[in-house]
Amino acid sequence: MISVNRKLRLAVQLISLLGFLWLFLQTEYRGTDELAYPVSLLFRLDPLALLAAFFAPGESNLFLLWPALLLLGLTVVLGRFFCSWFCPLGALLDLLGGPFRRQQLNFIGWPKLKYYLLVVLTLAALCGLQLFGLFDPLSIFLRSLTLVINPVWNLLANGLFDWLYQAELPLVSPVADRVYPFFRDFLLAFRQPVFLLGLFTAAVLLVLVLLERLQPRFWCRNLCPLGALLGVCSRHSLLQRVPQTDCADCRFCSSRCRMGASGTQAVHSAECIRCLDCLEFCPHQRIEFNFGTRSTDKFDLSRRSLLTASVGGVLLAPLAAAAPLSTKSRNDLIRPPGAVIEEEFLRRCIRCGECMKVCIGGALHPDLLRGGAFSLWSPVLVARLGYCEYDCTLCGQVCPTGAIRLLQVKEKRKTKIGLAVIDKNRCLPFAQGEECLVCEEHCPTGKKAIVFERRKVLVGSDPQELLQPRVLTELCIGCGICETRCPVAGQSAILIVSEGETRTPQRLL
C-alpha cells in the first residue's frame, strides 16, 4: 500500500520529468527563429551552471541564473528535496534502473567521494579549468536526451510511420494520417538527428543505469557533485526528520533508505533527500518531519582527503594546459556563431547539448579532442555533416551560461566563424577539368562569397575554358554549406578553417 506522501512525490516527480521533456522537445525549429518557451529553464535552476558562470572570465550574466539561487535558498529551508522530487536524472535512474536492482550493497565511505569531487571541480574552476559540465547530472540528462534518446526516438517514430504508410492497412492508415501531423509538429525533430559521440554518450548513461544493480541511486549517493552542493546547504536545513536516529527496537529505516541517510547514530541530513519514504516504512508511525528541529549530524570528512582534493583541484588546471592535447590552435576548431573567446568559452560551456539539439542545419556536434583534452562534449561545427543556417540565431537563445552570445539576425549574418578554403587537389574544376558550380550556388551571403573566374586549362591535350571557384575572404563567414554540399566523395574539396573568426568576450545583455 503506497502512502499519500509517496504518491504525491511520485506525481510531482513524473510531472517534473514530463515538463522537462516537453521543454526539451520545444528546443526545436518550428518555422520561426524565436523559441516560444523557456527551454533552458532546467539550467537556470542549476547551481553548478551558476558556479561555472561565476568563475568564468568576462562580464558576468549571473542575473540570468537567479533561479539557481532560489533553489539553494529553498534547500536551506527544506533540505535536499530537489534530488527526489525534481531532478530529472534521478527520476530517469528510478525509471530505468528499477529492473536492475538486486541486493543493496554497502559501500562504506563512498558517499564522501562526491564532496571531494565537488572540492576538486570548484578549485579547478577557480584556477581556470571548468569541468562541472562533465559531472553535472542535469548536463548528463540533457546530453543523453540530445545525443542518444532523441535520435533513437525519431528514428523509430519515423520508421513506424513509414511502415504504416507502406503497409496501407485499411483501418490503421487513416489514423496514422491524423496522428502524424501532431508528431511532426510537436514531438519529432525538424530533421533526423544524428550526432558524433552518440555511442560513447550512450555507454556513459548505460553505466549509470547499471550501477543501480550495485546500489539504489549509486550515482546520487556517491558521485553527484550537485547532490554534494545541495547536501552542504541542507545540513542545517529548517526541515528535519524526527527522531534523528533509528529506533533501537526496529532499525528498519537503515535497510530501506535508498540514500543510506538513516543510521543507528544519526540521520545524515546532508544525505537525506526528503523523499518521505521512511514515513511509509516505519511500522510504528514514529517518524515525522518538523520545522525548527536542530540537526545533530556532523560531516565526517577526512582532513587529509580534503587537502588532497584541494591540491588536486589547484594542480589540475596547469596540468591540463600542459597536456599534449591541450592545443587550441587547430584550424578545424569551429565554434558556434556568437561563441565567446576560446578560454572563456570552455569555462562557461556546461556541455548541456542544447545548442546541438536546436541547430537547424545539424552542424553542431560534441567535441572529442579538437578543442583540447578537456573540450569533451563542447559544441563544434562539423561542416561536412551540416552547416550553420544563415538567418538562424537559435543556439544563442538556448545557451544558459553565455558561452554563446545571443545575436540579432543582422549581426549574425556578419559574424565570421571561419573561412572557406579550396583544396585544388580535390576540387573538380582544378583537379579533373570538370565544371562544378555547387559551392557558389549554395553560398547564402547577400553578395556571393564564392565567385568564378574563367580560365584556359588543358583537359587532356585539349585547351578549354573552365569556370574555377575563388573565395572572397572579406565576404565569407564560414557557414560551411559549401563543404556540406560539395559533391566530391570523401573529404570535401572546400574546407572551413577557423582563420578570421570573430569572437569577443561575454557582454551583459
Image (cartoon, rainbow, N blue to C red):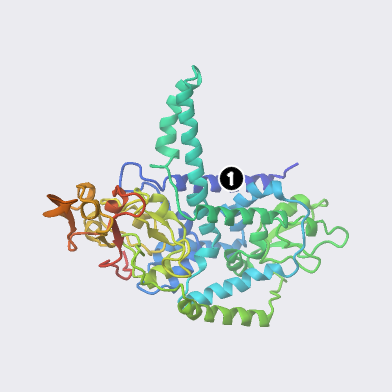
Residue occupying the point 42% across, 66% down: 370
Give the farthest residue toward the top.
170
Query: Which type of secondary structure does the marked residue at label 1 adopt?
Result: helix
Quarter of the picture containing the N terminus is top right
Amino acid type, callout 1: Leu
User: Where does the image place residue 180, in percent across and percent down from the top left?
Assistant: 43, 30
Residue 194 visible: yes
Crowd tier of the residue under label 1, counting other residues whose Cα lies within 10 Å: few below 14, some 14–19, many 20 or above: some
User: Where does the image place residue 270, in percent across and percent down from the top left?
Assistant: 66, 67
Residue occupying the point 52% across, 47% down: 149
Task: Tell me if 132 is positioned left or right of 234 in this view.
Answer: left
Residue occupying the point 61% across, 70% down: 232
User: Where does the image place residue 340, in percent across and percent down from the top left?
Assistant: 34, 67
Residue occupying the point 18% across, 58% down: 470
User: Where does the image place residue 158, in percent across and percent down from the top left?
Assistant: 46, 35
The one nearer the camera, 80 or 378, is: 378
Question: Total marks drawn?
Answer: 1
Q: Quadrant of residue 312?
A: bottom right
Task: Tell me if 255 is positioned left or right of 237 in this view.
Answer: right
Give the farthest residue toward the front.
461
Residue 236 visible: no
Task: Tell me if 486 is positioned left or right of 448 in this view.
Answer: right
Query: Disc 1 designates what residue?
Result: 14
